[in-house]
Amino acid sequence: MFNKLVNELKQNKYTTIVFFIFLFLFLIGWLIFGLVMPKNGEPVYGNRLDGIEEVKVTNDEKDKLVTELEKRKYVNKASVHVNGKIINVLVETTNGTKVGTAKTLKKVVLEGFSKDQLSFYDIQLFLTNEISTAKGYPAIGYKNSNDNNFTF
């Protein structure tokens, strides 16, 4: 039986050579794909979110912060979104609000989170005005988890 297989391969040597070349290229491609592509089943953030359960921002905390921000007469609307280790606070101010006045909202944002949350999350404060051409807007403040205050 083995001799019959060898004779068949000798009679079709070009087909056999092409088959083994494609097999070799397929194996090389498979190895390269395995090295380049991320492993399936691993979290997108890796281990960067370890411990997030202990300092999770609840919906009640988000709603309370939005309420505190909207109490200001110069704030039209506010919202809070958490994505991984980043908290985005979006605030729209009324027409005529100076950027300096809007930047004071950073105190309200800092008071809206616990000390542990402030040391875990990065916070971005997006300030916009209801008039899109208002001078100084939009303004963006950023607070790293290691910082104590915002940088605009």
Image: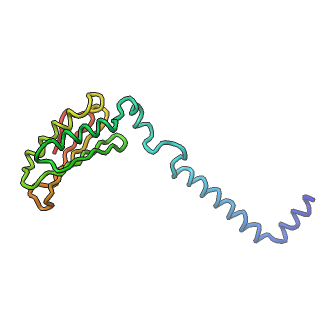
Left or right of 95 on screen, residue 113: right
Residue 118: x and y in percent read: 26, 33
Residue 67 found in image quarter: top left
Left or right of 110 on screen, residue 13: right
Foreground residue among 9 and 138: 138
Report the residue at 8% width, 46% height from top. Answer: 100
Q: Residue furthest right?
A: 1
Residue 52 found in image quarter: top left
Report the residue at 12% width, 62% height from top. Answer: 133
Report the residue at 91% width, 63% height from top. Answer: 4
Residue 107: x and y in percent read: 15, 36
Report the residue at 34% width, 36% height from top. Answer: 58
Foreground residue among 38 and 137: 137
- Total marks placed: 0
Left or right of 83 on screen, residue 143: left
Residue 123 found in image quarter: top left
Residue 99: x and y in percent read: 9, 49
- Does 50 sit above or below residue 94? above
* Image colouring: rainbow
Residue 116: x and y in percent read: 30, 28
- Does 21 sit above or below residue 44? below
Foreground residue among 55 and 33: 55
- Does 112 sit above or below residue 139? above
- Does 97 sit above or below residue 1? above
Foreground residue among 65 and 127: 65
Pick the quarter of the image with the C terminus: top left
Pick the quarter of the image with the N terminus: bottom right
